[in-house]
Amino acid sequence: RKRALHWLVHEDSSSIDFSEEDDDLGLLHRYVVATIYFATEGDTWTRCSANKASSCDSEDERYLSASSHIKWDGIHGARNGEITWLDVSDRGLHSAAPESSFLPLELTLLSPTLELLWVSENPHLGGRLPDYLSEFQKLQSLSVYKTSVHGPLPEAIYDLKKLTSLRLYKSKFTGTISSRIEQLRDLKWFWIHENNFSGNVPSEMGSLKKLEGVTLHGNQFDFIITEDGESLYNNILPEALCDLRDRHLKHLWTDCEIGSVVPAAIVASGEEGGEKEKGNAGYDVKEGMRACSCCTRCFPRTNEVVAAVN
């Protein structure tokens, strides 16, 4: 914070006039971006850092350059400097304090206008999603995938009524998915695969009529035991979520049901029979079985594949 303030007061070479009352918010937003830059070791970023060793399409797009911060790479907003989009994905952000918030508290100064926040593909970005996210009532898209952000989802996530896209996959999240997810009525994309979520997939997800894509595989969700004729299948998908496939839900990815698949190499060798299932590359479904109850694609659990090979 001190470094950002010092830069803004003593080093910022911008000729932008923030003296007008309507531009006060723009000045605050410039300070916020500078704070995020220093808090995530911006001089080591791999793209558009102030350090000119990093690649950048133009000098105006570099962070901390004299140009308007709205021109900096990954930022969109109004002429007065108000930020609506902040995309700092895939540029080597680092967290100085892994157990604190994933981004500094000053981020809340963007809450009146921010609609998109992407910090994905920064594997050294840690910390947790904070409770202050509830202040971002205009936020429509939040992407934190392929990071080291960890811990449970804060209840604040379920207060983001305008959220249409939540992408958290291949990170280190834990805990359960709250039944309050039904409050996210505009949610279309919910990608949370390859984390450590547990508990039940809430049936309240069935009330999210706008869902188009859901990915759940690679977590630790509890099974729902459902009876199908004379067979019992292990399944994590509540019926209410399955019913959405008759609406807009075209992508529903989950783990394959226990014992239903075998690596394709074993089938090819003739050791065990199986049949191809479209979209399931690398393995086949065992004869007379199904891979999942209602998913559009399933992924075998790693321990099952290893057991089958051994």
Image: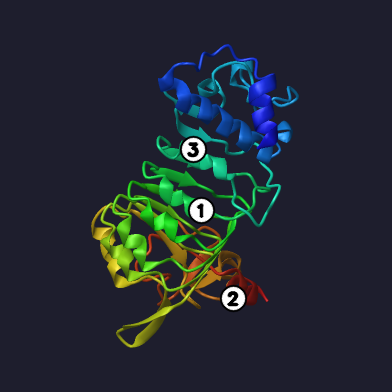
Q: Which mark is residue 109?
A: 3
Q: Quadrant of residue 276?
A: bottom left
Q: Nearer the viewer, residue 244 or 230?
A: 244
Please report whichever mark, 2 or 1, sits nearer to the chain's N-terminal start.
Answer: 1
Q: Who's the residue at 30% across and 49% down the image?
A: 186
Disc 3 marks which amino acid? Leu
Quadrant location of the N terminus? top right
Label 1 – label 3 distance at C-alpha: 23 Å
| Residue on which disc 2 sits | 271
Q: Which mark is residue 35?
A: none
5 over 231 or under it: above or below: above
Number of on-image labels: 3
Please report whichever mark, 1 or 3, sits nearer to the chain's N-terminal start.
Answer: 3
- Tag in front: 1 or 3: 3
| Residue on which disc 1 sits | 168
Q: Position of residue 290 (x, y in %)?
A: 40, 72
Q: Residues within 10 Å of mark 2 (few under 14, many from 20)?
A: few
Q: Describe the element under mark 1 as helix, strand or loop.
A: loop
Disc 1 marks which amino acid? Leu
Q: Who's the residue at 44% across and 78% down the image?
A: 223
Label 2 – label 3 distance at C-alpha: 62 Å
134 over 42 or under it: above or below: below
